Image: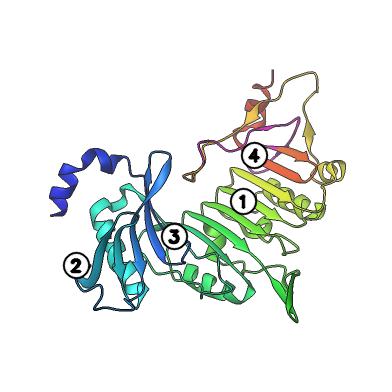
């Protein structure tokens, strides 16, 4: 049957670049595929019928990868699957889609943003390559355990928050620890990482990231954190795979002269035109039509001691950008106009 479906839908299959599991307004899991410039819901999971007799003729049993589930056709959600337990049903649906599409598409999971009402839910799905999640301090261990027992995920988009209870009111505060995840966490092994940690004082990603591209959004980041990061890159001690890093501070501004002095940056003559750094993104969101990282055009750069490769450094008030060139200093300077 799958071969028949594939052969009859070749053109449509080629337009599907990812399958995304997410949540709708009712916080029930949905399955999306891209459709033109938007995404189309092909399936929704729902709880059991409140009045099964009333809907007796509205649904039919369907075998999905060996699991029999109750299904009905819906105009807005394709198929609606009813189940008391979502995880085994999601796994069966995923196994079916995996058999249908194989490794030709990305499989993405988005957790419910309403973690104050619902328990954090991340099912174990084969070939999952993208994880969008948000959690508080209490759920971090759950996320870390999930990552620990799973293959490295290509892209992680993570929002970390922390709340202090104060009677009837809740207010934000800083994490009790500067490193919400241990240094060996697979969070830092993601090829592409975007992490928002507004209430975390110091971004631990600057110490432990092993991937290629990262965007960090935090409430504040000290100059010394950036100096330490750059000097570790220069020495060849860490960040050997890094291509692009961007740090956005919500509150504190970076002191350009202090940082450039601390990393012993080199300078291009201001009468000349420096080259612009940009690389292909390792991950592109469905709402993003830009295939490359943000351009970095800077008169300052640093050189890695081990291989003489260059990284452009750009500091603009609350933003720090770092772009690594696949070129030695000599090759880099020959591009200066």
Q: Which mark is residue 59?
A: none
Q: Main secondary structure of the magenta part?
A: loop
Residue placed under numbered mark 1 in the picture: 239
Q: Earlier in the sequence, mark 3 or mark 1?
A: 3
Q: Earlier in the sequence, mark 2 or mark 4?
A: 2
**Mark 4 or 1, closer to the camera:** 4
Q: Earlier in the sequence, mark 4 or mark 1?
A: 1
The range drawn in magenta is 288-312
Q: CA distance from mark 2 to mark 3?
A: 22 Å
Q: Which mark is residue 62?
A: 2
Residue placed under numbered mark 3 in the picture: 22
Residue placed under numbered mark 4 in the picture: 323
Quadrant housing the C terminus: top right
Give SS at disc 1. loop
Quadrant housing the N terminus: bottom left
- Residue 197 relative to residue 112: left or right: right
Above or below, 290 against 3 in this view is: above
Give SS at disc 3. strand
Tag 4 near tag 1, CB within 8 Å: no
The residue located at (82%, 48%) in the rendering is 253
- Residue 74 relative to residue 2: left or right: right
Q: Nearer the viewer, residue 43 or 276?
A: 43
Give SS at disc 2. strand
Tag 2 near tag 4, CB within 8 Å: no
**Mark 3 or 4, closer to the camera:** 3
Q: Residue 175 lies in magenta, yes or no?
A: no
The residue located at (49%, 46%) in the rendering is 285
Q: Position of residue 68 (x, y in %)?
A: 20, 72
């Amino acid at each position: 049957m799958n071969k028949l479906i594939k052969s009859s839908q070749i053109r449509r299959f080629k337009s599907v670049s990812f399958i995304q599991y997410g949540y709708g307004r009712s916080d029930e899991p949905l399955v999306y595929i891209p459709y033109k410039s938007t995404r189309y819901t092909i399936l929704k999971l729902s709880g059991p019928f409140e009045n099964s007799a009333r809907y007796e003729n509205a649904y039919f049993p369907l075998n999905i990868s060996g699991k029999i589930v109750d299904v009905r056709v819906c105009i807005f959600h394709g198929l609606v699957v009813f189940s008391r337990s979502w995880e085994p049903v999601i796994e069966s649906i995923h196994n079916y889609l995996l058999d249908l599409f194989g490794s030709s598409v990305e499989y993405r999971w988005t957790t419910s943003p309403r973690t104050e009402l619902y328990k954090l839910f991340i099912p174990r799905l084969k070939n999952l390559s993208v994880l969008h999640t948000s959690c508080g301090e209490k759920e971090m261990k759950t996320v870390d355990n999930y990552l620990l027992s799973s293959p490295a995920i290509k892209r992680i988009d993570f929002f970390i928050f922390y709340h202090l209870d104060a009677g009837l009111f809740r207010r934000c505060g800083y994490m009790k620890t500067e490193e919400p995840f241990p240094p060996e966490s697979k969070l830092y092994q993601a090829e592409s990482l975007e992490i928002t940690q507004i209430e975390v004082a110091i971004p631990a990603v600057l110490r432990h990231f092993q991937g290629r591209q990262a965007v960090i959004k935090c409430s504040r980041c000290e100059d010394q954190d950036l100096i330490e990061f750059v000097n570790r890159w220069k020495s060849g001690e860490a960040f050997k795979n890094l291509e692009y890093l961007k740090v956005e501070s919500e509150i504190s501004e970076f002191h350009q002269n202090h940082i450039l002095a601390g990393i012993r940056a080199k300078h291009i003559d201001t009468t000349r035109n420096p080259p612009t750094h940009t690389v292909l993104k390792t991950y592109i969101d469905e709402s993003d039509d830009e295939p490359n990282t943000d351009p970095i055009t800077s008169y300052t750069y640093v050189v890695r001691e081990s291989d003489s490769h260059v990284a452009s450094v750009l500091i603009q008030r609350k933003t720090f950008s770092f772009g690594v060139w696949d070129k030695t200093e000599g090759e880099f300077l020959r591009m200066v106009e």
